[in-house]
Amino acid sequence: MEKLISYPISVIYYLCFGLTLVIFHPIQWVCFNVFGYQAHKKSVDYLNFFLTKCTNILGTTYTFENKEIIPKGVPIIFVANHQSLFDIIGIIWYLRRFHAKFVSKKELGKGIPSVSYNLRNGGSILIDRKDPKQAIPVIKGLSEYIEKHKRSAVIFPEGTRSKNGKPKEFAQSGLKILCKYAPSAYVVPITINNSWKMVKFGAFPMGLGNSLQFIIHEPMAVKDFSFEELMQKTEQTIIQSIKN
C-alpha cells in the first residue's frame, strides 16, 4: 500500500527536488564568483535546507542527537555509515556550522545541477575509486585544508551505500590519510539510521514517513590514539548503534 500511495507523492517530490537544484545552480555561481567563499557556503547551506524541506513532502523527519558534544574551533573528521544521498543533505544543513567537506567519487563532479558545482568549488574532493594512487594526494590536500581552516571533512569508509542498512566493511586508507595530515583533528563517529528506507523501492517511488536518525558519538582526539585503535573504536561505535 505504501508503494502505491508513494507514486503520486514521489512525482511531486522529484519536481520540487529538481527545481531546487536548478534554481540554486546560478545562485551558487554568483555567490562563488562575485562574493567568495562565505557567500557560496551560505548558498549551499540553504540549498540543502530546501532539499530537506522537499523530503518533508514524503513525510521524512531528521533527528540529530548529541550535536552539543562536537568540539568547536578545531578540525573535525566526521566518520559515518552510508545509506543514501539523504545522509549528505542532512549533514550539510544540520551540521552547517562545521563547514563539512566531502570525499566523493569523481562521477558526481559533473552533470548534476548545484551538486556537481558545489563538489568542484566548495572545498570537497573528487576521487577516482579505480585509481587509489590518485586519491592519496587529493585526500592529503583535504586534510591540510581542514587543519589550516579548522573545518570538517566527512568520510564514508564503506565506500558505497548500504541498500538494506547493514554496514559493509570499513576501508582504512582514506581515514588514515586524514588523520595523518590533520594531527590536531578530532574524529567524530556518526551512526545514520533509516536513510536507506528512503530508497527501499529503488529511485522511484520513494519511501514514505521515515525518521532519519543521526547519532553523534563521543569525539576522539587523533593525537590520543594509535590509528589502529582509533579505527577500531570508530567502526565499533558506529556499527553498534545501527538499527536494521
Image (cartoon, rainbow, N blue to C red):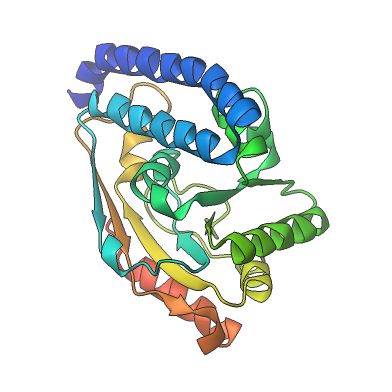
Up the image or down, 132 lies above or below 69; here it is above
Q: Residue 13's quadrant in the figure?
A: top left
Whole-percent x, y for residue 188 in the image: 43, 68
Q: Residue at x 70, y 39 (%)?
A: 106
Up the image or down, 126 lies above or below 243; here it is above
Residue 68 vs residue 31, the one in the foreground: 31
Whole-percent x, y for residue 233 in the image: 44, 79
Q: Residue 67's quadrant in the figure?
A: bottom left
Whole-percent x, y for residue 125 in the image: 66, 47
Whole-percent x, y for residue 54 in the image: 31, 24
Q: Is residue 201 visible?
A: no
For residue 239, side relative to residue 57 (left or right): right
Q: Residue at x 29, y 47 (%)?
A: 194
For residue 158, side relative to residue 240 (left or right): right
For residue 11, side relative to residue 63 (left or right): right
The C terminus lies in quadrant: bottom left
Residue 64 vs residue 39, the one in the foreground: 39
Up the image or down, 118 lies above or below 172; here it is above
Q: Residue at x 58, y 31 (%)?
A: 35
The N terminus lies in quadrant: top left
| Total marks placed | 0
Q: Is residue 61 visible?
A: yes
